[in-house]
Image: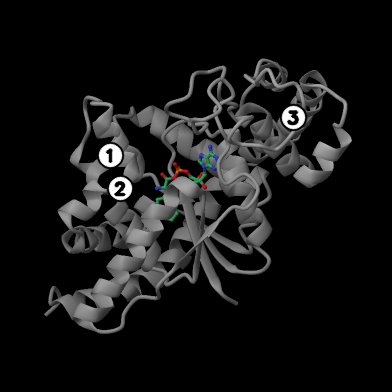
């Protein structure tokens, strides 16, 4: 079985974008691959966050992973900070990364261009920690959305650099970019990514939003004045975003939805998409509550950390020997 690894950082409440672009994919892959899915909680510290909020987001994220259908018997589910080898290899990857290389990472570049205040050194070097997260486990594939692809490319470069400098050590991972829903857009600003940290409340659907209010957000989504339903992300980004959401949640292809909408307007599409989101959130949240009430999360994470540590510790020992840290 080929190995796959991915993670999400608990910086805020999870969005429909995280579900469609990432979690849904993880669930699909769990039967075909040996999966490692983790919560990138050390990455959450790259922007200021209160301890209580980080704890709450982390618990919510695990419960949502499970509610969405990840099966801890098939998937190794763990917290990044429970496996210290991530930080250990992270430092080595930071020392292997070029300053210019990290400056070219778009997320960092965008924040600098917007002259945001409070940009930390951690935000600058986080792609190196992400490379460590991946390389510790030798996965063949890393499922990510479009905006993370560049980080997986950097990971490949760092792995090749290390292998060349010190001899073969790491598998070179492939990014697997989601096909439908690689990027879900802000409902109010459909050329921008739906983001837990940057979208306005009306533009983003939180997985723990009240389902009725989520339906209203879809009804209030920005569209255009062309008036016909077509999948044309360039000229009709809002409508295309709704089609992507509906297709992802219903399993019906975008082409087939478009064909059904011949002669119909945006109102109907918003109605159907709103209902699909409403029903999806209702079912997900019911399971999420059940999982939290069962109180199994801690045991699942403990077992996950043990399994992950066995692999990660072997790898970091090997790396320490190769670079000369262990005597
Ligand atoms: P993060 O937490 O920003 O996002 C996690 C995953 O969610 C998906 N995603 C989206 N997909 C579609 N549309 C959107 N609007 C949208 N927003 C988010 C993406 O698939 C993304 O992959 N650095 C990573 C976390 C990380 C990681 C790793 C991932 C740390 N180490 C190692 C993979 C492997 C991050 O910030 O993702």
Circle 2 residue: 105
Mark 3 / mark 1, whichever is N-terminal:
1
Mark 2 / mark 3, whichever is N-terminal:
2
Q: Residue at x 56, y 21 (%)?
A: 203
Circle 1 residue: 109
Q: Residue at x 70, y 38 (%)?
A: 231
Q: Is residue 204 left or right of residue 270?
A: left
Whether the residue under disc 2 has CB within 8 Å of ligand 1: no
Residues at discs 2 and 3 in contact (Cβ within 8 Å): no
Pick whichever, 242 or 92, lies toward us.
Answer: 242
Q: Residue 252: image x %, image y %? A: 81, 45
Circle 3 residue: 282
Res 165 quadrant in image: bottom left
Residues at discs 1 and 2 in contact (Cβ within 8 Å): yes
Callout 1: SS? helix
Q: Is residue 327 left or right of residue 177?
A: left
Q: Residue 88: image x %, image y %? A: 24, 61
The answer to whether residue 219 is seen in the rendering is: yes
Q: Residue 11: image x %, image y %? A: 41, 35
């Amino acid at each position: 079985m080929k190995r796959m690894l991915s993670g999400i950082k608990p910086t805020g409440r999870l969005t429909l974008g995280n579900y469609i672009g990432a979690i849904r994919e993880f669930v699909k892959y769990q039967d075909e691959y040996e999966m490692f899915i983790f919560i990138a909680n050390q990455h959450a510290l790259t922007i200021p966050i209160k301890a209580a909020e980080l704890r709450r987001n982390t618990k919510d994220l695990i419960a949502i992973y499970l509610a969405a259908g990840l099966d801890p018997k098939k998937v190794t589910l763990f917290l990044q900070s429970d496996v210290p080898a991530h930080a250990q290899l992270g430092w080595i990857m930071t020392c292997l990364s070029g300053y210019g290389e990290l400056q070219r990472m778009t997320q960092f570049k965008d924040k600098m261009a917007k002259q945001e205040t409070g940009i930390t050194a951690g935000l600058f070097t986080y792609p190196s920690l992400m490379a460590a997260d991946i390389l510790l486990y030798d996965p063949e594939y890393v499922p990510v959305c479009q905006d993370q692809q560049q980080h997986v490319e950097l990971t490949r470069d760092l792995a090749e650099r290390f292998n060349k400098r010190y001899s073969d050590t790491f598998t070179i991972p492939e990014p697997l970019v989601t096909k439908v829903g690689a990027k879900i857009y802000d409902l109010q600003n459909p050329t921008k990514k739906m983001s837990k940290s940057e979208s306005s409340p009306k533009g983003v659907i939180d997985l723990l939003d009240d389902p009725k209010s989520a339906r209203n957000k879809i009804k209030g989504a920005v569209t255009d004045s062309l008036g016909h339903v077509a999948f044309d992300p360039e000229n009709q980004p809002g409508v295309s975003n709704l089609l992507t959401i509906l297709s992802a949640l219903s399993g019906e292809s975008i082409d087939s939805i478009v064909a059904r909408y011949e002669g119909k307007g945006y109102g109907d599409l918003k109605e159907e998409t709103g209902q699909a989101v409403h029903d999806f959130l209702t079912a997900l949240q019911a399971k999420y509550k059940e999982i939290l009430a069962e109180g199994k999360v801690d045991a699942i994470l403990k077992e996950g950390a043990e399994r992950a540590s066995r692999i990660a510790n072997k790898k970091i020992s090997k790396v320490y020997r190769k670079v000369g840290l262990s005597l």
